[in-house]
Structure formats: C-alpha cells, structure tokens
Amino acid sequence: MFRLWGKEFKDNRMVRDTVICDDTDDTRTHKIFNALDAICYEFDLSKPIWLDATIDEFKRHDKTRFTQDNFVDSIDFDYLEIHIIEE
C-alpha cells in the first residue's frame, strides 16, 4: 500500500490535509505523480513544477515543499508539503 500525505500550510499552521492511497502496480514515480495530481484536484490547485531543489529534497527525505516558486498561478498559502508515509 502506497500512501502520500499532502498538507497545505499558511502562517505555520496546517490549513488542510489529505492522504492518497494507491494499490496499483504502477511504478513508484507514477504513484507519486498520480497522488500529487489527486491532491491538487482535491485542493483545487494547479500542478506544481518540480524544480531541481524540490527533486533533491524529495529524493533525500521522501518529503518536499512546493512554494510559490513551484506554481505558475498565485497561491493563497505559504507552501504545499507532500510526504510518503507508507510504501
């Protein structure tokens, strides 16, 4: 069971969160992208851009933050954090 936790923060407080579960036989990368798409759909956000720093942080910690720099549209929160909680 693959689970990805998506959290939206504003002023150091979690505004909302969701957990996306994936039982498919997809690759780990596809599961991450599909879960991020589901989180963005649920939170009504545009899809963030994976910058080099974002990718490096995610590779090291299985967790990363998407700030305004990662979004084309303007966002009304400080950052979106994703974290793999189970593989």
Image (cartoon, rainbow, N blue to C red):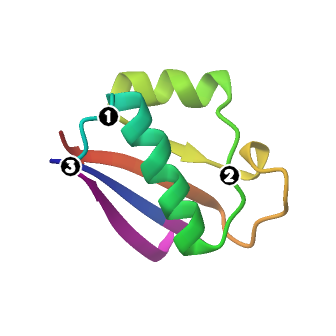
What residue is disc 1 on? 26
Splitting the image into 4 quarters, where does residue 60 fall? top left
Please give the residue where the numbered disc 2 appears in the rendered image.
Answer: 47
Q: Up-down: is 73 above or below 84?
A: below
Local SS, label 2:
loop
| Start-end of magenta stretch | 8-23
Q: Position of residue 61 (x, y in %)?
A: 34, 30
Alpha carbons under labels 3 and 1: distance apart: 9 Å
Marks 2, 3: nearer the viewer: 3
In front here: 44 or 85? Answer: 44
Residue under label 3, please give it.
Answer: 23
Q: Is residue 22 magenta?
A: yes
Looking at this view, is 75 or 41 the one in front? Answer: 41
Which quarter of the image is occupied by the C terminus?
top left
Horizontally, residue 86 falls left or right of residue 43, namely left
In the image as oriented, which residue stretches furthest toward the right?
73
Q: Residue at x 70, y 39 (%)?
A: 49
Identify which residue is drawn at 41% across, 71% down. 17
Q: Position of residue 83 (x, y in %)?
A: 36, 47
**What is the three-letter code of the residue carrying label 3?**
Asp
**The residue under label 1 is which amino acid type?**
Asp
